[in-house]
Image: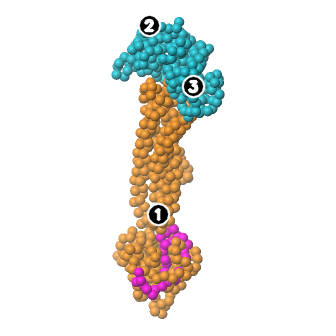
Chain colours: A orange, B cyan
C-alpha cells in the first residue's frame, strides 16, 4: 500500500508534486480558518480592530515579514550559490594535477583562488595529451596578475571550450597577446605588464619588459574566469624565464603540441574526452602515485553534500527562529487583546457566541500572520536579489538566486503552524471575566 | 413577546467569596419600566449584569418567563441575551471605526442567518426614528448624544423583550440626556419592552413606573412612582 503510494507519488510530474506539497502544508491553515469562521461574519470587526491599532499591527507585520524574509532569503541564497558554483565548474570535466588536495586544486583551477600547488612535469603532460581517449588537454598555469585580475596561461582550444566564440576581437596568436574576461575593464588594444603574484603577495615590476596586449574578449561565463586575463601558457613560462614548451625551432608556436623536454611544468591540466565513460577511464588511469585526477563536479558535489547538511540545519534554524518570533508576536497579541478586551466583552454581553468572539480574535491574528508572511516573501525576494549581487561581486561566481518551491513550502509550513498557534490567544480571551472587562 | 421577571434568593459573590448582592425577592411585570438607584458600590450594576446572566458566582433563581437563566450554561445564556436582551452602557461602547449602521447592526455579524435581515431592517428603522440620518458615517465623528442613540438602536436591533441600561445618561449633557430619556422610555412603552435602568438621573427615574433602591447589596423598601 505504502509502496504503491510512493510509486504513484514518484510518477507524478515535479510541478504537481510541488503544488500538492504546498496544498498539503497549507491545508491545516485552510481547514482551521474554515472551521473557525464558518457561519459568522467577523471581518468588519476584524477590520475595525486592525485599523484601531494600526501602528502596533504594522510593527507586528514588519516583525514577521523581516523574520520570514531573512529565513527564506537565506535558503534561496544557499541554493543559488550551489547552482552558481556548479555552473562555474561545468566546463571543467576532469582535472589532472600533482597529488594533493582536490579541494585546493578545485579552488585554484576552477575558481582561480590563489594557492601554491606542485607542478606536473612535461612527461606527464605528454602522456595525457597523447592518450588516445583525450580530445582536449589544456595546461592551466596561474600565479601572475594585473590590476587585481588573475592572469591564467592556457591554450586557444581551452578558451574555445570555455566560452565558444569571443564577444569581440580574436584569439591570441602570439605570446604577447591576451584575451580579457568579460568583466575585465581593459579595452581591446590595451597594453599591460603583468605583476608577479596575486593579491597581497603581488610583486610589481617583476616582469618588466614582458608586455602583453588585449586582442580579444570572452563572452560571460558566470565564473571567476570573467575577471581573469587569459594568455598563452607559453607567455606565463616566458615571463618567468623558462622554456616556452616548444623547441627553439618552433619558439613562436602557440598552443599544443608541447615538447616534453621544453615543458617547464603546469599546476593543472584540464582534460576532456568525448564520451563520459572515457572520462571515468582517464580518471582511473591518472589516479596514481605521481598524479591526481578528479572530476570538479564530484568534489563540488561532496562540498554541496556538506552544504546540504548545513542547509538542513539552516532550514531548521529558520523555522525555529520564525516560530520564536511568532511566539513573541502571539505573546504580544495576548497583551494586545487586552487593549480590546472591553470590546470583546461587549460582544459577549450582547450575546455573541463564544465561537464568534474566538473567530474575531483568531482572524485578527491570522490576518497579521498572513500579511507578515506575504511581506516576508517580498522581503526575501528583495534580499535574495541584493545578496546575490553582493556574492557575485565578491566571488565572481554568477549567483542568480530566486525564491522557489522550497521557500514556498517553508512559508506554507510556517503559516500553518503559526495559524494553529494563533488559536491560543483566541482561546485565552474567552477566559477573561466579561463583567470586569466591561467595567474597564 | 414580553417576559416577567421573578427573582428569588439571589446571592452574588466576589471571587474572594465576599457577598456583593443579596436579593430575597423581586418581581417585575412584563413591559414595566423600573429604575434602580443607590449609592456607588451598592450593587446596582451587579444586579443589572446578574439579570442578564453575565455576573459570575451568582446563586438563587433569576427567572425570565419560564427560563431560569442561572440554570443555563454559558452558551445558552448568550443565546438568551441574543434573543431577549438589549443592553445600553454608560459610555456607549461603540466600535469607533464602524459606521452607525455597522455598530447598531452588530448582532447581524453573529446572529442566526434568518435573523440577520430583520436585524438590519430594524436597525435602519430605529436609527431613522432616533434621528441618525447619515447611517454610513463612522461613529468616531458623532457627538455624545448621537453615539448614545446608536447604542440604543444596537440594543433594540434584535427586538428584545428586555432592555437593560447602565447609567445611560451619565456621559451626556442635560439636553442630550433629556432627549435620550424621552427616546428610551417612549420606545420601551411603544414596543412594550421591560425596561430596567440603573441611574442617578432623577429625570430618568421620574419617568419610570417604579424605582427600587439598593443599599449595601440589599433592596431597600420601595419608594416607587406607582
Q: Are marks 2 and 1 in contact (CB under 8 Å)?
A: no
Tell me which numbered mark, 3 or 2, is placed earlier along the sequence.
3
Q: Residue at x 46, y 83 (%)?
A: A193
Binning the other alpha carbons within 10 Å of mark 3 as few (below 14), some (14 to 19) or many (20 upward) gives some
Binning the other alpha carbons within 10 Å of mark 2 as few (below 14), some (14 to 19) or many (20 upward) gives few
Separation of disc 3 and disc 2 at Cα? 34 Å
- For this view, does A77 lie left or right of residue A167? left
Range covered by the magenta-colored residues: A204-232
Binning the other alpha carbons within 10 Å of mark 1 as few (below 14), some (14 to 19) or many (20 upward) gives some
Query: Number of marks in the image?
Result: 3
User: Vertical placement of B53 versus A114: above or below?
Assistant: above
Q: Position of residue A14 (x, y in %)?
A: 54, 53
Residue A343 visible? The answer is: yes
User: Vertical placement of B226 versus A12: above or below?
Assistant: above
Q: Which mark is residue B145?
A: 3
Q: Residue at x 55, y 27 (%)?
A: B144
Q: Which mark is residue A391?
A: 1
The residue to which callout 2 is attached is B221
Q: Secondary structure at mark 1?
A: helix
Q: Of residues A378 and B157, which is closer to you in this image? A: B157
Q: Of residues A107 and B65, which is closer to you in this image? A: B65
Separation of disc 3 and disc 1 at Cα? 65 Å
Q: Position of residue A64 (x, y in %)?
A: 47, 46
Q: Position of residue A99 (x, y in %)?
A: 36, 74
Separation of disc 2 and disc 1 at Cα? 86 Å
> Hey, which quadrant is residue B40 in on the image?
top left
Q: Position of residue B94 (x, y in %)?
A: 54, 29
Q: Of residues A348 and A81, which is closer to you in this image? A: A348
Residue B65 visible? The answer is: no
Image mark 3: chain: B
Q: Residue at x 51, y 28 (%)?
A: B93
| Circles 3 and 2 on the same subunit | yes
Amino acid at each position: 500500500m505504502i509502496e504503491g503510494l510512493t510509486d504513484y507519488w514518484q510518477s507524478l510530474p515535479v510541478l504537481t508534486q510541488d503544488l500538492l506539497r504546498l496544498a498539503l502544508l497549507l491545508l491545516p491553515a485552510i481547514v482551521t480558518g474554515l472551521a473557525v469562521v464558518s457561519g459568522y461574519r467577523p471581518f468588519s470587526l476584524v477590520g475595525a480592530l486592525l485599523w484601531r491599532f494600526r501602528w502596533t499591527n504594522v510593527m507586528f507585520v514588519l516583525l514577521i515579514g523581516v523574520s520570514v524574509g531573512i529565513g527564506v532569503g537565506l535558503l534561496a541564497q544557499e541554493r543559488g550559490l550551489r547552482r552558481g558554483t556548479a555552473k562555474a565548474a561545468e566546463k571543467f570535466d576532469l582535472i589532472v594535477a600533482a597529488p594533493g588536495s582536490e579541494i585546493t586544486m578545485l579552488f585554484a583551477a576552477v575558481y582561480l583562488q590563489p594557492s601554491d600547488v606542485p607542478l606536473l612535469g612535461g612527461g606527464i603532460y605528454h602522456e595525457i595529451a597523447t592518450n588516445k581517449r583525450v580530445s582536449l588537454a589544456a595546461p592551466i598555469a596561474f600565479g601572475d596578475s594585473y590590476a587585481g585580475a588573475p592572469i591564467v596561461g592556457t591554450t586557444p582550444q581551452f578558451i574555445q571550450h570555455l566560452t565558444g566564440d569571443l564577444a569581440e576581437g580574436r584569439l591570441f596568436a602570439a605570446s604577447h597577446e591576451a584575451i580579457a574576461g568579460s568583466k575585465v575593464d581593459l579595452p581591446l588594444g590595451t597594453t599591460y605588464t603583468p605583476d608577479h603574484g596575486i593579491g597581497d603577495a603581488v610583486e610589481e615590476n617583476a616582469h618588466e619588459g614582458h608586455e602583453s596586449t588585449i586582442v580579444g574578449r570572452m563572452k560571460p561565463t558566470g565564473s571567476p574566469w570573467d575577471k581573469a586575463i587569459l594568455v598563452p601558457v607559453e607567455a606565463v613560462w616566458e615571463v618567468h624565464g623558462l622554456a616556452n614548451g616548444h623547441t627553439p625551432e618552433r619558439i613562436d608556436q602557440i598552443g599544443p603540441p608541447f615538447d616534453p623536454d621544453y615543458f617547464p611544468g603546469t599546476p593543472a591540466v584540464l582534460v576532456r574526452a568525448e564520451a563520459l565513460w572515457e572520462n571515468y577511464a582517464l580518471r582511473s588511469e591518472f589516479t596514481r602515485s605521481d598524479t591526481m585526477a578528479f572530476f570538479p563536479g564530484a568534489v563540488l558535489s561532496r562540498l554541496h553534500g556538506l552544504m546540504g547538511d548545513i542547509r538542513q540545519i539552516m532550514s531548521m534554524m529558520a523555522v525555529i527562529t520564525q516560530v520564536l518570533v511568532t511566539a513573541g508576536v502571539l505573546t504580544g497579541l495576548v497583551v494586545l487583546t487586552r487593549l480590546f478586551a472591553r470590546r470583546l466583552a461587549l460582544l459577549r454581553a450582547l450575546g455573541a457566541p463564544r465561537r464568534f468572539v474566538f473567530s474575531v480574535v483568531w482572524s485578527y491574528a491570522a490576518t497579521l500572520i498572513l500579511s507578515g508572511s506575504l511581506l516576508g516573501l517580498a522581503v526575501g525576494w528583495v534580499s535574495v536579489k541584493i545578496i546575490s549581487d553582493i556574492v557575485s561581486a565578491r566571488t565572481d561566481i554568477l549567483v542568480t538566486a530566486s525564491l522557489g518551491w522550497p521557500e514556498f513550502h517553508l512559508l506554507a509550513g510556517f503559516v500553518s503552524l503559526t495559524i494553529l498557534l494563533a488559536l491560543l490567544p483566541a482561546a485565552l480571551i474567552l477566559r477573561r471575566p466579561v463583567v470586569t472587562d466591561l467595567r474597564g | 413577546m414580553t417576559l416577567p421577571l421573578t427573582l428569588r434568593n439571589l446571592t452574588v459573590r466576589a471571587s474572594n467569596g465576599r457577598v456583593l448582592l443579596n436579593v430575597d425577592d423581586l418581581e417585575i411585570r412584563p413591559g414595566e419600566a423600573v429604575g434602580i438607584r443607590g449609592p456607588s458600590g451598592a450593587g446596582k450594576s451587579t444586579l443589572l449584569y446578574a439579570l442578564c446572566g453575565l455576573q459570575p458566582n451568582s446563586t438563587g433563581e433569576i427567572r425570565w418567563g419560564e427560563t431560569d437563566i442561572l440554570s443555563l450554561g454559558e452558551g445558552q445564556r448568550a443565546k438568551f441575551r441574543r434573543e431577549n436582551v438589549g443592553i445600553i452602557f454608560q459610555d456607549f461602547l461603540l466600535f469607533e471605526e464602524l459606521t452607525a449602521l455597522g455598530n447598531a447592526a452588530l448582532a447581524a455579524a453573529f446572529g442566526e442567518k434568518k435573523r440577520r435581515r430583520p436585524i438590519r431592517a430594524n436597525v435602519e428603522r430605529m436609527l431613522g426614528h432616533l434621528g441618525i440620518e447619515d447611517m454610513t458615517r463612522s461613529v468616531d465623528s458623532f457627538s455624545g448624544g448621537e453615539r448614545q442613540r446608536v447604542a440604543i438602536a444596537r440594543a433594540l436591533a434584535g427586538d428584545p423583550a428586555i432592555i437593560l441600561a447602565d447609567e445611560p445618561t451619565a456621559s451626556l449633557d442635560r439636553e442630550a440626556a433629556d432627549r435620550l430619556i424621552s427616546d428610551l422610555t417612549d420606545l420601551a412603552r411603544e414596543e412594550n419592552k421591560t425596561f430596567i435602568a440603573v441611574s442617578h438621573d432623577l429625570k430618568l427615574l421620574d419617568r419610570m413606573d417604579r424605582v427600587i433602591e439598593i443599599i449595601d447589596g440589599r433592596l431597600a423598601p420601595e419608594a416607587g412612582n406607582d
